[in-house]
Image (cartoon, grey):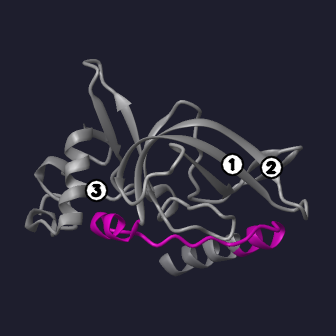
Amino acid sequence: MLRILFSCLAAALFIGSAANDSRATSVVRFPFNTLCLNAPRILRVRCLSTAAEIDSDRNRVFTRTQFEVLETIKGPAPGDGRIDLVLPGGRVDGLTQVVPGMPVFREQEEIVLFLTALSDTGSPWPMGLYQGCYGVRTDSDGQRQVELHPGVTPLPGGAAFKPVSDQPFRVDLHRFRQAVLNVLAGSPGAASETPGK
């Protein structure tokens, strides 16, 4: 039964990819420690604007998103306090391209981004696509909370980050930042890559 299901899924993916002239995307799952250590830059940002554009060959859509840098957690701070991401996918002039796993940003949204080095578009990407994007929300007491999504965004180790269900949950921004800094400092408490261990 499992073999039949797998064969059907593989056939559907093949047919779907043959009908679409988009590039393939593979996403490697990252443990939290690897995300922290391998990201050249970790920034807390606010989305200022987002706009889709078509490349010069008119066969691919890219979305350019500009962010205001609110805090630099790792790596060099941008000189002008802003950073642009140019990522594949988006909708413009009746052409829509979707890249599975690629994050979509909304204006005024606050996010902690774990970024790669520059890509061939001249901009960094979130590491592991959606895995490198942690939404930041303000709770009813005015405190900043980072959203953690079990199975989607890698979770820091330790009891404070252990999910009680598979539903998204929030942790204090300061505690999340400290978990990142502990990994970067090689703290013994940061050695665990599995929540709760």
* Residue 124 location (% of width, % of height): 56, 62
Q: What residue did someone put label 3 on?
A: 155
Name which residue lies at 26% across and 26% down. Answer: 143
Task: Pick the residue in front: 148 or 106.
Answer: 106
Q: Contact, CB < 8 Å: mark 2 with mark 1?
A: yes
Amino acid marked by disc 2:
Glu
127 vs 122, left or right, is left
35 vs 191, left or right, is right
Q: Which mark is residue 53?
A: 2
Amino acid marked by disc 1:
Arg
Whole-number angstrom distance, CA of label 2 to CA of label 1:
8 Å
Sequence-earlier tag: 2 or 1: 2
Whole-number angstrom distance, CA of label 3 to CA of label 1:
28 Å
> How crowded is the residue under tag 3: few (<14 C-alpha within 10 Å), some, or many (20+)?
many
94 vs 15, left or right, is right
Report the span colored magenta.
14-39
Q: What residue did someone put label 1 on?
A: 64
* Residue 79 location (% of width, % of height): 51, 49
* Residue 31 location (% of width, % of height): 31, 68
Amino acid marked by disc 3:
Leu
Q: Determine which quarter of the picture holds residue 189.
A: bottom left
Q: Label 2's element?
A: strand
Name which residue lies at 58% across and 67% down. Answer: 118
Q: Is residue 17 magenta?
A: yes
Task: Pick the residue in front: 108 or 5.
Answer: 108
Name which residue lies at 39% across and 60% down. Answer: 75
Q: Is residue 20 magenta?
A: yes
